[in-house]
Amino acid sequence: MRRNTSRAVNLLVVLALSGAGTGALAGCGNGNGKDGDGGVGGHGGRDAEARARQVADAWDGSKAADAWREGYFPMGEAVQLPENGLRDGADKHAYTTQSFVLSGELPATADKDGQVKWGSADSVTLPLMGARKAYDTVARGGNSGAHLTVTGARLGEMTLATSRGPATVPAWLFTLEGYDTPLKRVAVSPSKLPEPPLGPAGQMPTDVLTPLGRLVEVAGDGRSVTVMATHGSCDDGPAVRVLETGGSVVLSASVVGTKDGPCTAELKREEVTVKLDQPVGDRVLLDAFTARPVPYGERNGPSPSWS
């Protein structure tokens, strides 16, 4: 047990330093992740399920859930590439490393608002992001090597997946040298997340419950969700369980098993896809540990912030 405890402590320290979770975690696993007191089955599994149901009960029908359904919360990338993608490996590397050069003028925009619109005629009005600020979120790398050249920009629109379904969103359309179609960047920031109706979990072993990393993707049909889960260097990886209700989808992450050998304080991230019985729809996608919506980790822009 001493070996397992030290390994769990290593993971907890790394999680705390990385800001991956809120609140305290403690304890260690029993090493198998399936049966016994910790893991998918046994008391640990029942504890995780009880926590997930507590989170669902707190959110379903709450003011926070109503606010979630009335706001703009993206579930897709803030940047869309030109039609047919990037033309070669050098341009793909430049985009990945955010290596851009500005050759030309960006339009100056007075303070104004833009509308995010859904097909049902619903809309949300939000402050527009200036072209320069939008460009700076894309061009954060160096430009001494392979780079993409931006020659100008205009204000337009793009379609983006959100918590309320596909939306038409204001976007800056950046013209790229050598491309016939623009690179698009969302021109509004997400709404502020509502105050959660429940606090984060208290002390729990890592093989019972850990905080999720971020949302990676919701499948086009809404029947599967991919999240980034965290785990340590001395376990067998992450596991994610799902609890579905009429108003929410609660994801419970944990680590599975332990490995023999040296244990380093290294935080690993792994994509995990879970299948759902019903499409996500407008249900709130929640992290059982934090009791908050699973954040979408935009590559080029901020995630929603808490009010």
Image: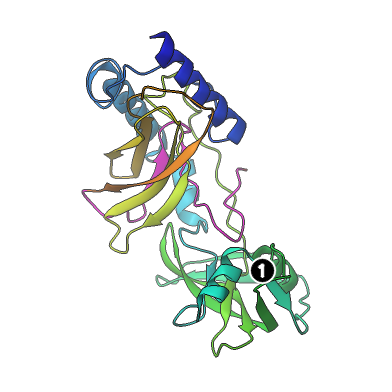
Assess whether residue 304 is covered by the magenta stretch: yes
Q: Please say if 291 is above or below 246.
A: above
Q: Please say if 88 is above or below 127.
A: below
- Residue at 43%, 30% in the rendered image: 210
- For the C terminus, the image quarter is top right
- Residue at 57%, 52% in the rendered image: 303
Q: Nearer the viewer, residue 191 or 85?
A: 85
Q: Residue at the far top: name it.
A: 2
* Residue 136: image location, x then y, percent: 71, 66
The residues colored magenta run 277-306
- Residue at 44%, 82% in the rendered image: 84
* Residue 201: image location, x then y, percent: 46, 24
Q: Which residue is mark 1?
A: 99
CA neighbours of label 1 inside 10 A, class few (<14), some (14 to 19), many (20+)? many
Question: What's the coloring here?
Answer: rainbow
- For the N terminus, the image quarter is top left
Q: Is residue 129 visible?
A: no
Q: Is residue 292 left or right of residue 32?
A: right
Q: Amino acid at mark 1?
A: Ser
Q: Is residue 74 left or right of residue 34?
A: right
Assess whether residue 290 is covered by the magenta stretch: yes
Q: Quadrant of residue 170?
A: bottom right
Q: Is residue 196 left or right of residue 237?
A: right
Q: Nearer the viewer, residue 276 or 29?
A: 29
* Residue 229: image location, x then y, percent: 42, 40
